Image: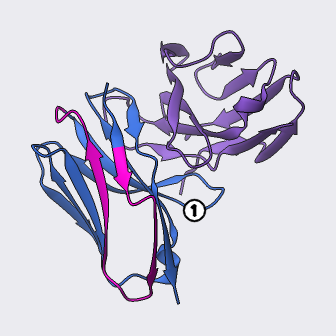
């Protein structure tokens, strides 16, 4: 069964450092999402891509977060500088068509900022 | 702004019990509602998806219902098993193509 790949699985970084996460969606999935899940809460959307274009980044803290999907395939989410409050699970998901249901989530990257 | 609330936050039951997880939302104008399962430290697995025109969906021991007029959905788990232990998340989409809005989840523990 096809999966959404994310790396690394775990990341510990010091505050003020830069950190990056990588996501490889299911082949052929045009829509890619990055969600952030703080412990004990539900996931919240950070950014949504349709191919290589951003269609929703209204909840992305743009002063420190950036996301790209240059070739419309895999994607990178970056935080610089990291803050203690960024400690969370970062989940990537993809779907074939954003108008059609059927999200597949990756296993996530657990970030701890110390 | 749409708000999704899940009650209870945590639930512990003995194996074999039938149980109900609750999800409520503030705006009944939704496109669909979905239940996910999340194992500790893992991603989300879709369980059931209910379109706004539907009242319920069933898969094996799981049954999800939707009552838009009252802003409620329930997930019924029959004959619970220890393997059902996980966090169950309710989420909804307000329009086709819009983001998913999640509740905070119910952490379920089924004791052998």
- Compared with B81, A79 (above or below) is above
Question: In the displayed structure, does residue B111 sit left or right of residue A89?
Answer: left
Give left or right: position of A4 versus B75.
right
Residue positioned 37% across, 29% down in the render? A98
Magenta span contains residue B17: yes
Q: Does the magenta stretch include residue B28?
A: yes
Chain identifier of the residue bearing label 1 in the image: B
Q: Give the range drawn in magenta.
A: B5-29
Picture residue at 39% right of the left edge, 35% below the top: B100
Chain identifier, blue in the render = B
Position of residue A83 in the picture relative to residue B38 (left or right): right
Q: Which chain does the purple colour mark?
A: A
Camera sees residue A101: no
The quarter of the image holding the N terminus of chain B is top left
Q: What element carries label 1?
A: loop
**Residue annotated with mark 1:** B39
């Amino acid at each position: 069964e096809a999966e959404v790949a994310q790396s690394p699985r775990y990341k510990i970084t010091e505050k003020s450092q830069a950190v990056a996460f990588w996501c490889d969606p299911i082949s052929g999935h045009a829509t890619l999402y990055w969600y952030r899940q703080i412990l004990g809460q539900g996931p919240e959307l950070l950014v949504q891509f349709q191919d290589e274009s951003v269609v929703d980044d209204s909840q992305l803290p743009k002063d420190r977060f950036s996301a790209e999907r240059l070739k419309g395939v895999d994607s990178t989410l970056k935080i610089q500088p990291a803050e203690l409050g960024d400690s969370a699970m970062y989940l990537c998901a993809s779907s074939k068509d954003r108008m059609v249901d059927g999200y597949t989530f990756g296993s996530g990257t657990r970030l701890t900022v110390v | 702004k749409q708000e999704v609330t899940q009650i209870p936050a945590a639930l512990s039951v003995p194996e074999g019990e039938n149980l109900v997880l609750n999800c409520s939302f503030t705006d009944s104008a939704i496109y669909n509602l979905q239940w996910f399962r999340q194992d500790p430290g893992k991603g989300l697995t879709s369980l059931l998806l209910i379109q706004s025109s539907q009242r319920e969906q069933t898969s094996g021991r799981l049954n999800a219902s939707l009552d838009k007029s009252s802003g409620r959905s329930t997930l019924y788990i029959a004959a619970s098993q220890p393997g059902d232990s996980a966090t169950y998340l309710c989420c909804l989409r307000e329009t086709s193509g819009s983001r998913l809005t999640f509740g905070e989840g119910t952490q379920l523990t089924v004791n052998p």
